[in-house]
Image (cartoon, helix red, strand yellow):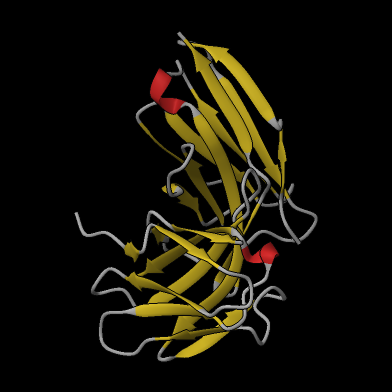
Amino acid sequence: EPEVTQTPSHQVTQMGQEVILRCVPISNHLYFYWYRQILGQKVEFLVSFYNNEISEKSEIFDDQFSVERPDGSNFTLKIRSTKLEDSAMYFCASSLQGAANQPQHFGDGTRLSIL
Amino acid sequence: QQPVQSPQAVILREGEDAVINCSSSKALYSVHWYRQKHGEAPIFLMILLKGGEQKGHDKISASFNEKKQQSSLYLTASQLSYSGTYFCGTNRDDKIIFGKGTRLHILP
């Protein structure tokens, strides 16, 4: 069964450094998402991406964050200058259509630890 | 606005039933249910799209009461594999807003 893959599985970074999290969505999916989950808390929406542009973003997704689809398969999340509070599990998800009536398939996540 | 889930946590013995509720103060257009095991990704269970809709597979089912702006997830004759955190989510445009989750622990 096709799946969403994320790399790396764990990233340790010094505060203030840039980090790029990578995702390969399911190949025929058109919508891509990033979510964040702080340890023990709920899954929080960050951003959705469709047709090569951001379709929606949350208050968490400030100027320090950006997303890109550099080629036909990868979808990346960049955090420009990491803060301690960015430590969390970051999940990429994709869906065939928008969130209204299609399931989102999640990758296994990248655990980001900011020191 | 995020949906509210209840209860926050449930402990059951294998074979017992559980109900997890999800409600919203705003109109629900669809309700998504996911299960997440510790350290793993959320796994899609089902979507309910219309008021009055009920869905299920195996012994996990859900209903959607659009007028009451709520959904319930039913786990019948629970198995050890059902342990995990259950999240309901409501869609707002292209995003899902998740509730805080209900932790379900099944004892043998």
> x%, y% of residue B104?
57, 27
> x%, y% of residue B98?
62, 54
B61 lies above or below A10: above
Which image quadrant is residue A107 in? bottom left
Answer with left or right where residue A94 lies relative to residue B26.
Answer: left
Image quarter of the N terminus of chain A: bottom left
Q: Residue at x 41, y 76 (%)?
A: A31
Which image quadrant is residue A35 in? bottom right
The residue at the far left in this view is: A1
Image quarter of the C terminus of chain A: bottom right
Answer with left or right where residue B2 lies relative to residue A48.
Answer: right
Please state which of residues B73 and B39 is positioned toward the viewer in this rendering: B39
> x%, y% of residue A2?
21, 59
Please state which of residues A22 and B50 is positioned toward the viewer in this rendering: A22
A79 lies above or below B90: below
> x%, y% of residue B22?
67, 43
* Label tally: 0
Work out whether residue B91 can be spotted: no
Q: Residue at x 42, y 63 (%)?
A: A102
Answer with left or right where residue A2 lies relative to residue B89.
Answer: left
Q: Residue at x 48, y 26 (%)?
A: B83
Q: Residue at x 26, y 80 (%)?
A: A73
B16 lies above or below B54: above
Work out whether residue B39 can be spotted: yes
Please state which of residues A62 and B42 is positioned toward the viewer in this rendering: A62
